[in-house]
Amino acid sequence: MGSRLGFISAEIEEMKSKGLFKVPPILGGPQGARAIVNGKEVINLSSNSYLQLTTNKKMKKAAIAAIRKYGVGTGAVRQIIGTMDIHEELEKKVAQFKGAEAVLMFSSGVAANSGTIPTLVGEGDVIVSDELNHGSIIDGCRLTKAERKIYPHLNMEELEKILKESKHRRKLIITDGVFSMDGDIAPMDKIVELAEKYDAITYVDDAHGEGVLGKNGRGIVDHFNLHGRVDVEMGTFSKAFGCMGGYIAGTNDLRSYLIQRARSFLFSTSHPPATVAAISAAVDVALEQPKLFDKLWNNTKYFRRKLQKLGFNTGNSQTPIIPVMTGQSAVAQQLSSKLFEKGVYVNPIVYPMVAMDKARVRNIITAGHKRKDLDAALAAFEEVGKELKLI
Ligand SMILES: Cc1ncc(COP(=O)(O)O)c(C=O)c1O
């Protein structure tokens, strides 16, 4: 059986021998600041649930009410008969929240990137992309016939050089807003200035800026006060908003165009009512509870400052994504597993997610973390860090 798939077994063995074979950890309950991971209760420093809304009461209530009214599924893609009134209402609400004309939902952030990028550029065009952009941006770019030029991480001189030399029909500058492995922030103000100077389209993936940056978590465009000057804002409801689903915010025309052209929108069934209702409630929570953002940022600053004081290298983190750099993959893996033994779950990030010599563990701080849990995690970091000679 499966004789022609023998290469898979060989590749799996090779991954295992290099320590690159990963088994997803299993949550035995809700996703929270404390969670049951592989049967053990731990302090969870690995989720993207920045506002800790995955278990929010208002959102759960809204989801249950939507199931009662609309059922559990939509039965079709949006263009056939999968668009409910609640999908359209949610898109209008998110557009207002973001300060954009219009929003279009996709089944995920990955689908938003893979569906949208190929509608904007093609043969004769150029995509100018930060070297550390997320994999789903890279995949979206691969789906086009546009030329690709990569600029060194955050390097505005190199970006300008590429834009200046380009003779292409259209230029698209694409960047993560907050970089998912390093937690640093793209200089959107400078990127927009260059885009305006060289007549380029701007596209920002705000997956980790949403619910984190800007007033009430409106994201990176709000953070830099660039409303109306960024052409395409991609976001996701899967991180700070605690649910799932991607979206694109922009003009009414952009939305209409994507409805006609974006393949991942056209060919994928719409969100179930429960998810739509929960996301809608999440927007209300973000507007009604500004204290959540204070908690998120207080926790973030506290944890980063303490890690640095202990002597850890936290890279260029400016957000709740706080790496502890280890250099070698094996050290990141050891650090992660020793922390787990002490009741702290933090992901090792190794090649190919980052360059071979840039391994790290990645802490993600949320509004839901209690100070005593952060202190317990810091004590574990101190002990293991000394043992591994990282500090
Ligand atoms: C920067 C970035 N963009 C896009 C995505 C994809 O979002 P989603 O999980 O909604 O598909 C992620 C998720 O990991 C991400 O980190």
Image (cartoon, rainbow, N blue to C red):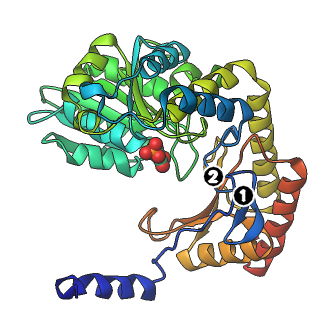
- Which residue has dot 1 on it? 44
Q: CA distance from mark 1 to mark 2?
A: 7 Å
- From the viewer's perspective, tell me whether residue 32 is left or right of residue 333: right
**Crowd band around label 2 with a 10 angstrom C-alpha radius: few (<14), some (14–19), many (20+):** many
Q: Is residue 91 above or below residue 55?
A: above
Picture quarter containing residue 11? bottom left
Q: Quadrant of the N terminus?
A: bottom left
Query: The disc labelled 2 sits on which kind of residue?
Result: Ser
Q: Is residue 227 above or below residue 24?
A: above
- Which residue has dot 2 on it? 47
Q: Quadrant of the C terminus?
A: bottom right
Q: Could you tell me if residue 324 is visible in this image? A: yes
Which residue is pictured at 82% across the width and 68% down the height? 380
Establish whether ligand 1 lies closer than 8 Å to the Cβ of label 1: no
Query: The disc labelled 1 sits on which kind of residue?
Result: Asn
SS type, badge 1:
strand
Discs 1, 2 touching: Cβ within 8 Å: yes
Q: Residue furthest left?
A: 124
- From the viewer's perspective, tell me whether residue 214 is left or right of residue 157: right
